[in-house]
Image (tube, rainbow, N blue to C red):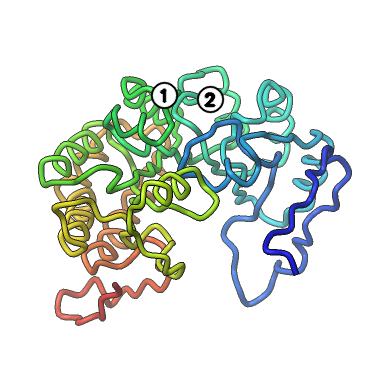
């Protein structure tokens, strides 16, 4: 028995079988979005990312004909393009996106901030049915972006990227990493003000997590820094790296104060006080902010939590908080 088994990368993704969408269609478990994939991997080399480590920061694209074959078999109009960045598919998007329009999907995807500056790409995506973009902004502090190996993204592009998307009726879901460097009430307030001023629609907040196999994990191990090896905590919602001068409890308190500040009533109304280019989706997104996400973070419940109870909206209902 070997400790590791390494397979050779499949050089071509052409002709792979379509997912068996029929196995889940109509079953008791309801899927709001069905997956569609364009390729595997990522060109970037962010040191915290397991995708970069697994695929050696390479990307392999599928033929357009295979993607369209899969799309024709999806039994719903709601689709999640599961690539780690839509733009990794490159110039082929100019041909693929118009072809996807025929299916009249309403879809969302992951997108890097730099790609959201490409207005031609966004026009094609909007016409093809894109309704939401999940963007890994990670941090608003340049030194932290450099620390993560994400120097290819620029902070001064963030606000423009958000505006470009929202002008086309596309909701912006931001992903940020917390605890890259020591945190304080001051850093929390700076991040919160930036997110609210940019009018970000939704926020997913994750602790800086040194996943095994990543450059971050290797760097921390070599430096002799002590951090938990309890893999059950490695989901991004538990603090793994505790900086000197701060306790785990203090870091968690700051994490939840940022989350709760973003989703409080005042800041939610500030974020959604803008022209609704897609009124129906704008209204439904604001409703989710007020009725679901705000309840979750107020009860310190992970955004990964799916068991929403509308009893939680009642002020006298004593729900159990998840930790």
The answer for how far apart the CA atoms under marks 1 and 2 are is 8 Å
Q: Is residue 262 left or right of residue 103?
A: left
Query: Which residue shows up at 43% across the image and 39% down it?
Result: 136
Q: Residue 288: give its label.
A: none
| Residue at mark 1 | 164
Within 10 Å of the Cα at label 2, are there few (<14), some (14-19), or many (20+) other Cα atoms? some
Residue 159 in which image quadrant: top left
Question: 168 or 304, which is in the foreground?
Answer: 304
Asked whether the residues under the numbered discs 1 and 2 touch, taking CB atoms below 8 Å apart as contact, a structural biologist would say: yes
Q: Residue 113, percent across and down?
A: 44, 29
In terms of secondary structure, where does tag 2 sit?
Answer: helix
Q: Quick check: 50 left or right of 3?
A: left
Q: Secondary structure at mark 1?
A: helix
- Residue shown at the point (69%, 71%) measured from the top left: 26
Q: Quadrant of the N terminus?
A: bottom right
**On the image, numbered disc 2 is attached to which residue?**
122
Image height check: is 8 above or below 154?
Answer: below
Residue at x 46%, y 28% (from the top left corner): 168
């Amino acid at each position: 028995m070997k400790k590791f088994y390494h397979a050779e990368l499949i050089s071509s993704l052409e002709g792979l079988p379509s997912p068996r969408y029929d196995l889940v269609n109509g079953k008791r478990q309801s899927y709001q979005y069905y997956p569609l994939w364009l390729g595997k991997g990522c060109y970037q080399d962010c040191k915290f990312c397991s995708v970069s480590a697994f695929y050696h920061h390479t990307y392999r694209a599928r033929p357009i004909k295979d993607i369209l074959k899969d799309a024709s078999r999806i039994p719903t109009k709601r689709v999640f393009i599961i690539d780690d960045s839509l733009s990794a598919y490159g110039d082929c998007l100019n041909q693929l996106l118009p072809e996807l329009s025929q299916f009249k999907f309403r879809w969302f995807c992951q997108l890097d901030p730099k790609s959201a500056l490409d207005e031609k790409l966004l026009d094609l995506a909007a016409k093809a049915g894109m309704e939401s973009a999940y963007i890994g902004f990670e941090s608003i502090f340049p030194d932290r972006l450099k620390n993560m190996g994400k120097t290819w993204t620029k902070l001064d592009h963030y606000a423009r990227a958000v505006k470009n998307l929202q002008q086309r009726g596309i909701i912006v879901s931001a992903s940020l990493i917390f605890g890259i460097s020591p945190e304080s009430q001051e850093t929390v307030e700076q991040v919160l003000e930036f997110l609210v001023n940019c009018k970000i629609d939704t926020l997913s907040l994750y602790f800086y997590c040194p996943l095994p196999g990543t450059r971050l994990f290797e760097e921390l191990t070599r430096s002799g820094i002590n951090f938990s090896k309890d893999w059950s905590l490695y989901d991004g919602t538990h603090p793994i790296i505790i900086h000197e001068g701060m306790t785990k409890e203090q870091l968690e308190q700051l994490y939840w104060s940022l989350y709760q500040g973003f989703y409080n009533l005042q800041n939610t109304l500030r974020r959604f006080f803008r022209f609704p280019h897609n009124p129906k989706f704008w209204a439904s997104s604001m409703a989710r902010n007020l009725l679901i996400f705000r309840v979750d973070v107020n009860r310190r419940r992970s955004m990964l939590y799916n068991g929403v109870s509308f009893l939680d909206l009642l002020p006298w209902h004593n729900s159990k908080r998840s930790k």
